[in-house]
Image (spheres, rainbow, N blue to C red):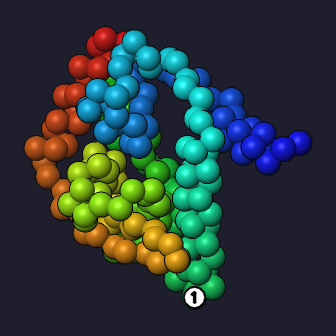
Amino acid sequence: MKVKELFNNYVNKEPRERKKGFFYASEVGSIIKGYLLPSDFYTTKKINATGQSNIISGQAFEAEFKKILEHNEIPFKHEPRYEVKFDDITITVKPDFEFADKVIETKFPVKLATDEEYLERYQYQLELEHRCTNKKVYLGIFTHPFNLHLVEFLPDMARFNKIKKSLKDFNDFI
């Protein structure tokens, strides 16, 4: 089997069954920005070779950071599962790293951006992580060579209300 096939089989595995009213925190930004439409909710798009490599790279960086924390005996939870519920909506939220006093959501972006641009891109996912844990949330940007740049996220009730309204409206059209 070719390496490309291995990557494709790993990243483009069988999708989970989608159900109306159930969302993932990582997709909320795509819904609000209009990249994911109600008409496409049940459709799974295959991820191309570049996207596959980017996903695997991010997962590798995250796995290495996890090993570093374990080696240093830092207490943390890796990808704890939470739910935010309102009306007929349930959002699954899985922060990458949760500590006693904070959460770190890690990303390995391909394109360099400013801290503000990174925060804008992931603001809805970070908002939901704060709402679930009631802790400070940091966006952790992995860079190469291996490093982790932390950017503090500031929660905002108006943003949270926008999430709720947007998902309710989206759900009504599925």
**169 shown above or below 94:** above
Q: Is residue 83 visible?
A: no
- Picture residue at 59% right of the left edge, 81% below the top: 68
**163 shown above or below 157:** above
Callout 1: 10 Å neighbours few (<14), some, many (20+)? few
Kind of residue sitting beneath label 1:
Asn
Figure quadrant of the C terminus: top left
- Picture residue at 13% right of the left edge, 48% below the top: 157
| Element carrying mark 1 | loop
- Picture residue at 58% right of the left edge, 45% below the top: 50
* Location of residue 33 (image quadrant): top left
Q: Choose between 50 and 168: the one closer to the eye.
A: 50
- Picture residue at 63% right of the left edge, 85% below the top: 71
The x and y percentages for residue 160 are 19, 43
Q: Choose between 22 and 153: the one closer to the eye.
A: 153
| Horizontal relation, residue 104 to residue 126: left or right | right
The x and y percentages for residue 8 are 71, 39
| Horizontal relation, residue 58 to residue 112: left or right | right
Q: Is residue 138 visible?
A: yes
The x and y percentages for residue 11 are 65, 41
View extreme (left): residue: 158
**88 shown above or below 145:** above
Q: Choose between 37 and 101: the one closer to the eye.
A: 37
| Horizontal relation, residue 98 to residue 68: left or right | left
| Horizontal relation, residue 126 to residue 52: left or right | left
View extreme (right): residue: 1
Figure quadrant of the N terminus: top right
Can you identify the residue that label 1 sits on?
A: 72
The x and y percentages for residue 127 are 26, 51
